[in-house]
Image (tube, rainbow, N blue to C red):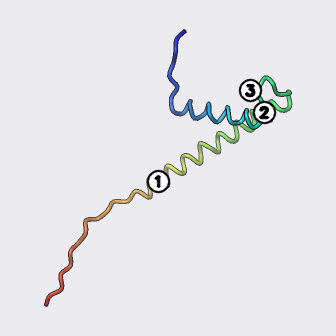
């Protein structure tokens, strides 16, 4: 069997998806009724979009926080 490595984004989505299944109390979406399955996947789609947006906003906010530190200036008083 060929193994493939998951990207960081794929691992993040997998953890997100498995967490949602845990909230619904199932090990597979196939265990859900038709209505619950529709609700589940709608929630996945909406919450994943929110998650990505929050992550992007946090990344942009962190860029703004990283400011350049100026060299200290020494000031001498004349006697």
What is the quadrant of the C terminus in the image? Answer: bottom left
Whichever of callouts 3 and 1 sits on the residue coming sooner in the sequence is 3
Where is residue 40 drawn, in percent x and y? 77, 34
Mark 3 vs mark 1, CA separation in Å: 36 Å
Q: Residue at label 2?
A: 25
Q: Residue furthest left?
A: 79
Q: Is the Cβ of the residue at disc 3 closer than 8 Å to that at disc 2?
A: no
Quadrant in the picture for residue 10: top right
Residue neighbourhood size for the residue with mark 2, other residues' Cα within 10 Å, grouped as few (<14), some (14–19), many (≥20): few
Mark 2 vs mark 1, CA separation in Å: 36 Å
Residue depth check, mark 3 versus mark 1: number of the one nearer the observer: 3
Whichever of callouts 2 and 1 sits on the residue coming sooner in the sequence is 2
Q: Residue at label 1?
A: 62
Mark 3 vs mark 2, CA separation in Å: 7 Å
Q: Secondary structure at mark 3?
A: loop
Q: Residue at label 3?
A: 27
Where is residue 36 drawn, in percent x and y? 83, 32
């Amino acid at each position: 069997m060929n193994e493939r490595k998951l990207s960081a984004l794929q691992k993040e989505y997998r953890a997100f998806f498995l967490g949602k299944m845990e909230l619904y109390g199932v090990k597979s979406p196939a265990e859900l009724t038709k209505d619950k399955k529709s609700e589940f996947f709608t929630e996945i789609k909406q919450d994943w979009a929110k998650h990505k947006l929050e992550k992007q906003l946090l990344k942009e906010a962190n860029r703004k926080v990283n400011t350049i530190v100026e060299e200290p200036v020494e000031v001498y008083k004349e006697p």
